[in-house]
Image: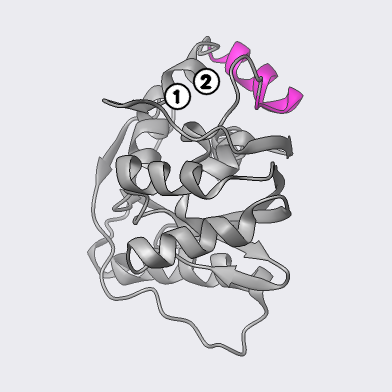
Amino acid sequence: MNFKHRLILASNSPRRQFLMKEAGFDFTLDKPEGDESFSPSMPVNEVPGFLAEKKAQSIAHKLREDEVILASDTVVILDGQILNKPKDRVDAIAMLTQLSGKTHTVITAVCLLSKTKKDCFDDSTKVTFKKLREEEIVHYVDHFQPFDKAGAYGAQDCLPAGMNPCSQEELDFLKSIKRSDLVNKTLTKSQSGIGMVAIDKIEGSYFTVMGLPVHRVYSHLQQF
């Protein structure tokens, strides 16, 4: 896109970097400083916005007049509780067992920050998992190592064949930027084959579940 400022992506996530590149954003990368802690008393729906701004602020001291930081954070919420990145294999298996057969909420928040302006927003999507067998979960964890993913899964690993995961808004956006093939480019598989067919339904934005609602980022940057 034609953005008048120099864009800095504050992120350690390869998926966010991938989405930004494939959507045509020109940016440089700077990893956020500090940790991702938050108060346990904070309402769960406020956590991703708090963490996204925390990431942006952590490198704000480096900002020049012509630069804008983009930082983002994603949380998975099940029954009012946040499922963070799993600590280990046992934790990942336990999380996916919890998600099996249930509907959970994924919220991704984005913070845009310059020396003179701040714009923070979030996007929410409901994801329904089919009932998973224990051997499916174990195979997925062992072959896809989802330890850097909130909720211990990546949406791009868990779609049934032929499913269109995008909202109409996302499809229209991808068509407008001539990136209609982006969804297929997101799909992953390991050397052992396809991932875990876990997702039964997505209500909202697929890219929000992946970690960055690129259609909303695009519109907010245009107005920034």
The x, y position of residue 33, in whole percent, is 25, 69
The x, y position of residue 32, in whole percent, is 28, 63
Check if residue 10 falls in the magenta segment.
Answer: no
Q: Are marks 1 and 2 in contact (CB under 8 Å)?
A: yes
Residue at 38% over, 66% down: 90
Vertical position of residue 45 compared to residue 154: above or below: below
| Residues drawn in magenta | 165-177
Who is closer to the viewer here, 144 or 184? 144
Count of number-bearing discs: 2
Who is closer to the viewer here, 196 or 60? 196
Q: Quadrant of the N terminus?
A: top left
Mark 1 — residue?
187
The x, y position of residue 190, in whole percent, is 31, 29
Q: Secondary structure at mark 1?
A: loop
Amino acid type of the residue tagged 1 in the rendering: Leu
Amino acid type of the residue tagged 2 in the rendering: Val
Whole-angstrom CA distance, mark 1 to mark 2, is 7 Å
Residue at 73% over, 26% down: 169
Q: Residues within 10 Å of mark 1 (few under 14, many from 20)?
A: some
Who is closer to the viewer here, 25 or 78? 78
- Using the rendered image of the protein, determine whether residue 6 is visible from the camera's viewpoint: no
Quadrant for residue 80, please give it.
Answer: bottom right
Mark 2 — residue?
183
